[in-house]
Amino acid sequence: MELLFLGTGAGVPAKERNVSSVALQLLDERGTTWLFDCGEATQHQILHTAIRPRRIEHIFITHLHGDHLFGLPGLLGSRSFQSGETPLTVFGPSGLRAFVETALAVSGTKLRYELNIVEIDEGVIFDDDRFTVIAKRLDHGMTSYGFRVVEKDLPGPLLVDRLKALGVRPGPIYQQIKQGKTVMLDDGTVIDGREFVGPPQKGRIVAVLGDTRFCEAAIELARDADVVVHEATFAAAEQRLAHDYFHSTTKDAAEVAKRAGAKQLILTHISSRYQGAAALQLLAEARGVFPNTELAADFASFPIPREK
């Protein structure tokens, strides 16, 4: 599991930062990629990475402002041209369907794969045997969501050395033991499979938040998360400006991570007014509140290791 930032700027593209998009690489977990937001030129940014559009399985749109959305029709079309044939689902606020269907229809774009568009509300918006995704409304000038991606706990490892010490040889019986079943060995010995399985491997939690003021919903989404991706459009001194434009400062983002008990914070959606040393000052401000903070840059990647 890894986060790969494709665009980390705010509002309009800049030389150092494209507009919003971040990929959650789930290659080991499910062989796919999930995108969060798809600002203009996201598909161009992808060309500089190892991401394969045909492997993009889900796209989550936080809100319908152009810097989070305008790259979507182009990416959907290019995925079809590049041998993408597996289904793709796009989740986002009401109005998303009209935008996508109109763009594809007017441009005459035909897709070779099944496209599902899900207009969401708060609550669980995706759930399978490996992951759950929860959405909550944030505090922005238009409907804006944050997403909490929860990886389900994995069964503990089979304690093979202990089984071999008992003379239990590998075979179908190992699978029964790993499932915690009570089994009888060839010599008549009965063993409880639960005693030969290690503790479960705790699933990871990633919170990716759309544009927002400081709010309780952001804290709830970030609760105990391994990583929180939070916008930091403005420096701490611009609190009034941030509030007026429904955005967050560096200290707002850090306070969310701190109150949520998160493990790591990554700042993104940085205004183009902060270049070079000024951007590093943003990082310093956030670290003053929440030390384990990083500042995202375009093409920066952040592995999310499993807790040992």
Image (spheres, rainbow, N blue to C red):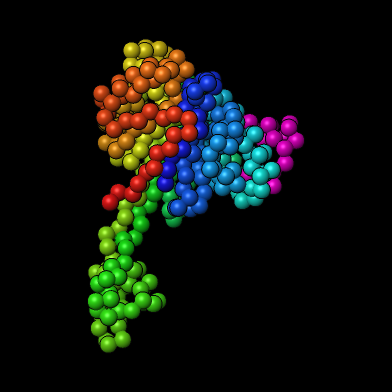
Count of numbered badges drawn on the protein: 0
**Image point (35%, 38%), residue name:** 227
Find residue 219 and report its horizontal and vertical position in percent.
33, 32
- Where does residue 293 sit, x and y in percent of width and height? 32, 30
Q: Position of residue 88 (x, y in %)?
A: 59, 46
Q: Residue at 54% of width from left, 43% of height from top?
A: 51
Residue found at the far right of this picture = 108
Does residue 104 show up magenta in the picture? Answer: yes
Q: Nearer the viewer, residue 289 or 66?
A: 289
Q: Residue 8, can we see it?
A: yes
Q: Is residue 63 above or below residue 239?
A: below
Instruction: Using the image as rendered, state which of residue 49 and residue 146 is in the foreground.
Output: 49
Q: Relative to 202, is 172 on the left or the right?
A: right
Q: How far across and down, in percent of the image, does residue 101 sit?
A: 67, 35
Q: Which residues are magenta?
A: 97-115
The answer to whether residue 148 of the structure is visible from this angle is: no
Q: Is residue 45 above or below residue 233?
A: below
**Left-right relation of 280 to 128:** left
State yes or no: residue 100 in magenta: yes
Q: Is residue 266 above or below residue 2?
A: above
Q: Residue at x 31, y 55 (%)?
A: 201
Residue at the spot x=36%, y=21% of the render? 280
Q: Quadrant of residue 232?
A: top left
- Corner quadrant of residue 224: top left
